[in-house]
Amino acid sequence: MRYITFALAKGRLAQKSMEMFEQIGISCEEMKDKNSRKLIFTNEELGCRFFLAKANDVPTYVEYGAADVGIVGKDTILEEGRRLYEVLDLGIGKCRMCVCGPASAAELLQHHELIRVATKYPDIAKDYFYNKKHQTVEIIKLNGSIELAPIVGLSEVIVDIVETGATLKENGLTVLEEVCPLSARMIVNQVSMKRENERISQIIRDMRALVLSRQEGQQQQ
Ligand code: PRP
């Protein structure tokens, strides 16, 4: 039996998605050993392999077929623009992509001023300002702590992920516009979807049923 290989975005998402995989009977004991330096973990019985990768690299592994299935945030899928199938919203890692800044910047957005936008997501920002808002802006790519940019005068606004809003609040910034909602998605390589259709479709069906039952559980609370 050929292995089905899963690429998971490192961090909280990987842990949460492994918990979900376990609930549909796909577990990996090897992965639970926190001291292990291994990069790839196997469940021989199920014919599955798992590896952790930087979020930005997960769509790359999936597009090239080095992984059949990937779990990664919608933000990364949009930004990377890879050829792959996005098959399921896992309903975890929910947050929003937003335009943020000091409240005073709202006016600059309203009047379509030529402003500078700092972001880790230049393609998402470009698509939003150019194609949706038809506003010309200067996009500045940063790699982290994006909230710093308007504070130190690098840009007027930022395009960034907002989860609880605590980072913005503590830095005197606010959400000015919402770009799109985000959450973790399951992605599948286009060839694997055909070649391993039976096994992958079963995984998608089981995962979809789990997501639905979790949503129903949440609504009842
Ligand atoms: C993300 C994001 C915000 C923060 C939002 O940063 O870029 O800074 O989380 O979360 P909150 O709304 O709950 O405060 P991350 O911690 O991933 O690190 P980064 O700044 O290096 O991108």
Image (tube, grey):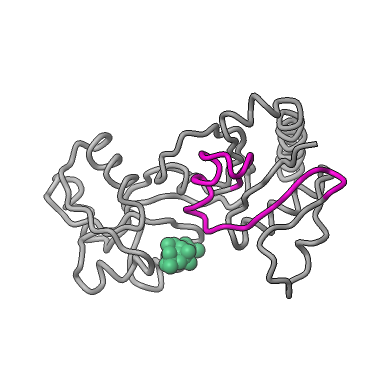
Left or right position of 142 against 169: left
**Quarter, ligand 1:** bottom left
Quadrant of the rendered structure where residue 140 is?
bottom left
Residue 51 inside the magenta-drawn segment: yes
Left or right position of 142 against 186: left
Q: Quadrant of the N terminus?
A: top right
Task: Give the vertical position of 84 relative to 198 (above or below).
Answer: below
Residue 128 x %, y %: 30, 41
Left or right position of 52 against 106: right
Given residues 215 and 80, the one toward you in this image is 80
Residue 182 in view here: no
At a point 74% along the width and 35% down the height, the residue shown is 203
Residue 211 in view here: yes
Residue range corresponding to the magenta coloring: 44-71
Residue 61 x %, y %: 54, 46
Residue 38 inside the magenta-drawn segment: no
Residue 135 x %, y %: 18, 41
At a point 35% along the width and 52% down the height, the residue shown is 121
Quadrant of the rendered structure where residue 82 is?
top left
Work out which residue is located at the far right of the displayed protein and give it: 45
Task: Give the vertical position of 175 relative to 169 (above or below).
Answer: above
Given residues 86 and 110, the one toward you in this image is 86
